[in-house]
Image (cartoon, rainbow, N blue to C red):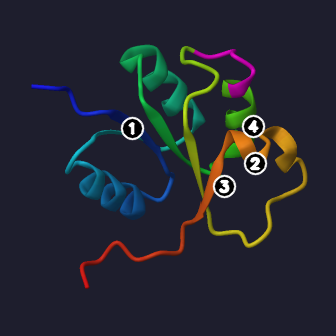
Amino acid sequence: MQARPKILVVEDDLKLREQLVQRLFHGFRPIPANDAEGLFSCLREEHPVDAILLDVLLPGVDGLSVCKKIRSGQEHCPSNIPIIMLSALSVLPTGSQACTPAQMTILPSRFSLQNS
């Protein structure tokens, strides 16, 4: 049996993080983290991971800075790992050039995970 792909789910909003993990569990192996420190800890423990679902507005170190650090090859994962950014912002903050559009995908975090 083939192993399910590991997806790091980095979201500080507990309710949203739990909903994302629950939905991703069907087909993936979601690994939750609530901030950048948790993400980097997971990368050290769970290497390799297949993708990262990353909130832009994290407490402490923001998601854009995390993306930049990963893309620079400073962490325990390939610098080209797929990163899907979640943001409630309509416009990214100054400094959003940390990752170019080719290096990340941004999805609005204002979506419903409820069944229709």
Q: Nearer the viewer, mark 1 or mark 3?
A: 1
Foreground residue, 94 or 35?
Answer: 94
| Residue at image mark 4 | 65
| Residue 94 painted magenta | no
Image quadrant holding the C terminus, namely bottom left
Foreground residue, 36 or 9?
Answer: 9
- Looking at the image, is mark 1 or mark 3 earlier in the sequence? 1
- Looking at the image, is mark 3 or mark 4 earlier in the sequence? 3
Kindly identify the amino acid type of the residue bearing the numbered disc 3.
Answer: Leu
From the viewer's perspective, tell me whether residue 105 is left or right of residue 41. Answer: right
Kindly identify the amino acid type of the residue bearing the numbered disc 4.
Answer: Ser
Cα–Cα gap, marks 2 and 1: 20 Å
| Residue at image mark 1 | 7
Kindly identify the amino acid type of the residue bearing the numbered disc 2.
Answer: Pro
Crowd around label 3: few <14 · some 14–19 · many ≥20 (10 Å): many
- Looking at the image, is mark 4 or mark 1 earlier in the sequence? 1
